[in-house]
Image: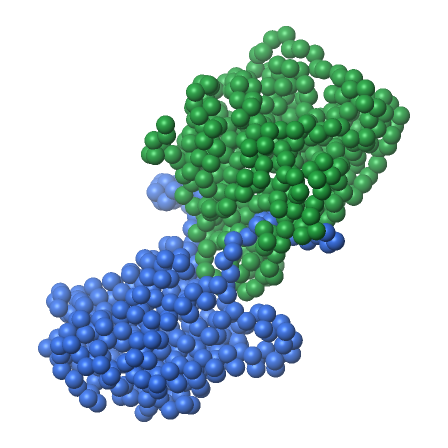
Amino acid sequence: MLIQKDVKILQPGIHVPDNKHYTGEKAVEIMPASKKVYISMSQGIGAPAKAIVNVGDRVLKGQMIAEAGGFISANIYSSVAGNVTEIKDIINSFNVLEKYIVIENDFSEEELKMEPLKSFEKDDIVNRVKLAGIVGLGGAGFPTSVKMSPRSKVDTLILDGAECEPYLTCDYQLMLTKYKEIEEGAHLIAKALGVTRIKIGIELNKPKCIELFQNNTDLEVVPLQKKYPQGAEKSLVYVCTKRKVPAGKLPADAGVAVQNVSTCYAVYQAVINNLPLYERIMTVAGKGIKEPKNIMVKNGTPTTEIIEFCGGVTDETIKLVRGGPMMGKAMYIMDGFTKKMDSGLLALTKEEANTQMPTNCINCGRCASVCPMHLTPMNYDHFCLADRYDKAKDYGVMNCIECGSCAYVCPAKRSLVQSIVVCKTKIREQMKKGGK
Amino acid sequence: MENIIVSDSPHIRSPRTTKGIMLDVLIALIPAVIMGCVYFGYKAAIVLGISMASAVATEFIWLLCKKTKPKYILKQFDYTSLVTGLLLGLTLSSSMPWYVPMFASVFAIGIVKMLFGGTGKNIVNPAITGRIFAVISFQSIMIGGWLNTAIAPIDGNVITGGATVLTEMLNNGKSAIYLSNLDLFLGTGVMGCIGETSKLALLLGGVYLVVRKVIDWKWPTIYILVTGLMTVFLNKFDFAYFLPSILSGGLFIGAIFMATDYVTSPHTKAARYAYYISIGLLTAILRKATHMEVVSFAILLMNLIVPLFDQWFRPRPFGSTPLRERIQQKFINKGGKSNESK
């Protein structure tokens, strides 16, 4: 049983209706492979990967088709067996030109596994994670191997099982079924980091998971009250350990490493089962989807096929979102191809997606009162519209984690996140120009 | 599904809107309006009606002059001018001739609000400024024009044509208070403007606003308490002054509805503490010095320096160096520039 005083809660933050009922109790279905997969070369933060196959080559499922294009970049593997038919630039669903490798599936399911590891030492694990092309599967897509070799000393590993984003249930389903594998994966990461203390933060709306992890694993479970954005790195570190990550620094500077539970599972698959990362669990939900599902989807599957697999979208759909509703991106067109870090595909109706036009800011201060980073979003909005990016920087805009809490509560429906992103981009541009 | 909408995140938004908040304020003012009409009769309703109608009309005419499409005018109408008109009417006496609420409303909406850019752009509270405009422009009507309530006080004397309780108290000390605290709280026998007589009605409205999370209970409470305690302090720690000083005059309507106006109050916690404490101190001190329009002027003056409060009491980003360490750094290595951004 849970004792109330053990339950941790993030102090600022917002209460969002979680809408997890669409797919909450639905077991993961494996989506059949599609005829053609389009694998993007830029999956996650950092430099795009470089293709190492040519048109006409035959590739196997699990064969490396592109290698990391820099330090912060990850290898990419084929998700089907078949022939490479094209390597071309396509405008993706977010209106960005990206390089894609198109592979025609021959349905032979011929698989190529990585070589089993001989020893499980620190460097072996990190190298294997790097080779397997694992990135943070929570949504940011930061290469996990980089996170596993921090510059400063780390003493605690925190697993993010909060899944504070509404609608998404992919981590929940994974935790229900694969808790043993997650535990193993966490131990592997802990070994690579050289830490012994592993905590996992789970929100109270997932009581089954809390019980499972408390009874069956040796991880230290931190029950969390439901609040958004509790799964964000810095917030999670604060609620689980009461340590504050210094402004402008990484969690490692507070002696903590944070990993998503699905990343742990991917690490387990790569190290123990020798499988690289080419598929993931995705939540397809929203009022606009006829049959909401949790599906195991292969990297590069066209979104139109996913939507078809889930019964199609209703006529009332006005918005298609990749990722969670708070931090995900709206799609310009229905066509698009999945990537490693896509945790969800949502079709929102008018009722759910509030698309009112912004009105004047009434200075109510709600955005500042909910900001988990203690910032003043209304100021950034003013500064952005007035082109005063230097002022915005003075007011600490670079600390923003873009969680969207401010814009969620805004009664004037102002696009605060957009203003903040503009400020940040402009400031980064200026810094590059200034050679700092 | 034909067209899909593309926008920035978040893709879900809270149901609360500016319009909804203003509607809540209007609902919270209903008890005060009812009590005003009970105490001062139909004339009070006429004053409120004129001020509300002219406030809305001013906004519409302004937008029409700016060649806004009529369809858009109706769409963007968010009840703010209705709230301003109603609050302004509540701070006037029911004996006003028709043109006083009208001119005050036109000034409040036309000059104070619309000229600065409409909702959210005004630098001072329109209702307060409208009232001050009326006091200065129509001095003979406004000052001494207070009427007694229709309901006699429960225990206390009825004084006709005299000064209000507050003025008496400020001029002649506590012996001159001719009404009990209960009368002051209920507003029976209190001379004053339409809305400020019944503190009970205002308090009910305030509770509604707190329950609906439109305002935080802390801010009006701080304002009222600080004013009361400062009055006690200025009167040599005589606590007999505490309740009469907070229950008389326009303090309640000012604290609950005027000072908590979003647009003209600071937007972060630390700044708000400083703002409401200083506004309370200012009210008590001004009451000692002058005897008229104290709450209005205190709020108006503090409204003007809100941007400074916002700048001075900015929250530090999460994870920045704590204050104590910063001070230590500053004093231990003098001249060494702290690498923290402000």
- Residue at the top extreme? A118
Q: Nearer the viewer, residue A30 or B249?
A: A30
Residue A347 image point, x, y percent: 65, 45
Q: Is residue A310 above or below residue A183?
A: below
Taking B198 as reference, is B311 left or right? Answer: right
Residue displayed at 87% across by 23% down: A57
In which image quadrant can residue A311 be found? top right
Identify the chain drawn in blue: B
Dividing the image into 4 quarters, which one contains the C terminus of chain A?
top right
- Residue at the left extreme? B175
Residue displayed at 44% across by 35% down: A204
Counting labels gives 0
Please name the color used to draw chain A.
green
Q: Nearer the viewer, residue A104 or A32?
A: A32
Taking B148 as reference, is B100 left or right? Answer: right
Residue A150 image point, x, y percent: 55, 26
Taking A92 as reference, is B206 left or right? Answer: left
Q: Is residue A415 above or below residue B36?
A: above
User: Can residue A415 be seen by looking at this rendering?
Assistant: yes
Residue displayed at 62% across by 46% down: A287
Residue B11 image point, x, y percent: 60, 49
Dividing the image into 4 quarters, which one contains the N terminus of chain A?
top left
Q: Which color scheme did the rendering employ for the protein?
A: by chain
Residue A4 image point, x, y percent: 34, 34
User: Can residue B111 be seen by looking at this rendering?
Assistant: no
In which image quadrant can residue B73 be found? bottom right
